[in-house]
Image (cartoon, coloured by chain):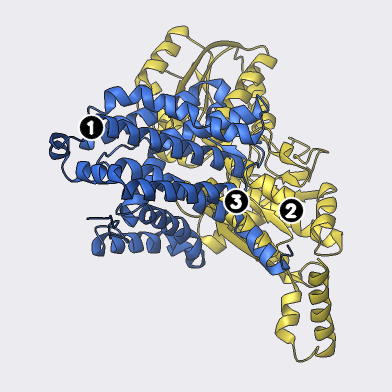
Chain colours: A blue, B yellow
Amino acid sequence: MIIPPWLDDFLWTYQNLIHALGINGLLALSMYVVLAVGQLSLGQAAFMGLGAYSSALMTLKLKLPFFMVLPASCVVPVLFALAIGVPTLRLSGVYLAIATIGLGEVLRAVYLNVDYFGGALGLSGIPERAETWMIYGLLFAAVAILWLVGRSGVGRAMEAMREDETAAGVMGVNVGRYRMGALLASAVLAGLAGALGAHVSSFIGPNEYGFEPAVTILSYALLGGIGTPLAPVLGAWILTLLPELLRGFSDLRLVFNGVIIVLAVLFLPNGLLSWRMKRRGA
Amino acid sequence: MIRRHFTAGLVTTGLVGFGAASLPALAQAQTVPVGAIEILSGPAAAYGIAIKGGLDLALDEINQKGVLGGKKIALTVEDSAADKNQAINAARKLIGRDKVVAIIGPTLSNEMFAVGPVTNERKIPTIGTSTTANGITDIGPYIFRTSLPEADVVPVTFKKAQARGVKTVALMYANDDAFSKSGFDVMKAAAEKLGLNILAIESFGTKDTDFAAQLTKIKGLKPDAVAISALVEPVSGVLLQARQLGFGKETLFIGGNGSNSPKLGAIAGAAADGLIVGSPWFIGKPDALNQKFVAAFKAKYGKDPDQFAAQAYDCMFILAAAIDRAGAADSEKITAALAKTSYTGVMGPFTFTDHRDPASAEGVVVLEMRDGKFGIAP
């Protein structure tokens, strides 16, 4: 395949942005799966950090090839999700949000204080192993799977839980199992995103997985909406693209960025894509 | 590749053929594009804005004469907002779209660890003016820095302390940012090398406001000196609380690079009196070059320059001189010319080591805080 030089140049210039769009899309989905069952669980940044650190250490210290590292990067976040799932899933609403943010901060403190994780200096010199096609392949697969799940009976149960958990439970939905399933799916998606992110930017540090990113990931889903899996991805893309599109405004960049988000939230409270999935017989 | 050369050929032919008609295009070719990536927004923007001020001031002087026989340097400064991804995006935009031949920055060592591999891969010389962490120039052969690493500055400060009779020291540092942590590593190594007895090592968070537990423990051990590696805000907090807890003149406080800011006097006031800190530059350095720089900076911006502005000011001249010596706006030639830099600026005489770090720490002066202002330590 011959790529014309201008396109080659364009792709090189925006390579990091193209990667970030895909990775943030995965993170938005990891938020979507918990919001879809009505859980305000904000552990995505923590899961992403676990995926990033465990995969970076596997690459740097164990010298494992990336095709092994990438699937293995889900293991630690999933184990962590299983461990915290039992106690935290008894919580709901803002209490769950606070507990999960707290867990993220605990992990950040661990990265900072354990020398094996590089402390405040983070881990640098991570080779660029993740390719664009891997990121978008995973994103496409995740959207497709979540779409199919959403259209099935499982999706119907999820939506019922989102609207009224007690009623859904009474109607025979195994609420506890769905909550745990959503948390595990969230951990897998965020872990993959973390591993991919670590292997495209050569450096990771503890502050990339603290409170601020947790809120950023939440805002992807809030801006896009949670009617379909595509909506949060769109939200992530807009919030990732805006700062780069507004580069021309230099000093006023953050002002414009903020104004656009405020306007979107004011006039589209259900997200940019608020339509719901069609189901047979619905 | 072939296609690109062909296009370049067409453009050149066009220029020759319609020389008079295509003046704007000609003017384009008469500039040398250079990029800079600095923090211009967010909580750490003060550093980037100081650096941009220094670069712009130097550029005004350089472009009066031009480089490569009259070409002007066109500097594009991109904001990184202290964010790793934005810093990488900025670097890729500067190289891919603006076709810069060299990059100054980014501001933080963390950002350099992310940006360096990208610019190094494209063989664009990249010069950090404020990156003091260990291992920066290990990224690759196109990564330079003009800022003295802490490893060169801190030992000078500690030697001064030892000369004043300091034998035992307690170390305090913020353990949650790269800058403070790597400064602490250097302090520990310097203290060990000089044979100082380290009585205690205490850490805190950059955003902490209460240091009583750490300070009380240290007070009980009665060290001759307390060395602090942190940004200026927590250092001010530590000093204020130390005075409340009864630390007096008998304890010498030693700061790292983070304490080297006029803000220390502004926040901590009299509590900071007596603190010593090593600095690669000092506003009161009497040589004519420095005085001219300080006066010009004040005239242009209405405020005093700080060390970041001074480092950036020198760096712009070092790069301009390297472009001149390279004889062409070509990254590879500029890299080779940079390595042979020999320049005397406001920081003093400057050359690079074989490893692209500053060669000499001769310019380092030890400063002492007195009545809210830094002066040269006696």
Of mark 1 and mark 3, the one earlier in the sequence is: 3
Rendered image: mark on residue B122: 2
A101 sits left or right of A3 in the view = left
Q: Are marks 1 and 2 in contact (CB under 8 Å)?
A: no
Q: Nearer the viewer, residue A273 or A205?
A: A273
Q: Is residue B161 left or right of residue B209?
A: right
Alpha-carbon neighbours of circle 1 within 10 Å: few (<14), some, or many (≥20)?
few
A112 horizontally vs B364: left or right: left
Q: Nearer the viewer, residue A131 or A108?
A: A131
Q: Residue furthest front?
A: A281
Kind of residue indicated by mark 1: Asn
Alpha carbon separation for disc pair 1 and 3: 37 Å
- Name which residue lies at 64% across and 64% down: A10
SS class, disc 2 = loop
Can you identify the residue that label 3 sits on?
A133
Instruction: Say which residue appears at 55% left-offset and 41% top-offset.
Output: A196
Marks 1 and 3 share the same chain:
yes
**Residue B126 visible to the viewer:** yes
**Mark 1: secondary structure:** loop
The residue under label 2 is which amino acid type? Arg
* Disc on res. A174: 1
Please state the horizontal and vertical placement of residue A139, each as a whole percent of the image.
49, 49
| Residue occupying the point 25% across, 57% down | A270
Q: Nearer the viewer, residue B186 or A96?
A: A96
Quarter where residue A13 is shown: bottom right
Q: Is residue B264 visible?
A: no
Splitting the image into 4 quarters, where does residue A224 fall? Answer: bottom left
Residues under labels 2 and 3: Cα distance?
Answer: 22 Å
Q: Position of residue B117 (x, y in %)?
A: 68, 45
Residue at 70% from the left image edge and 31% from the top image edge: B152
Q: Amino acid at mark 3?
A: Trp
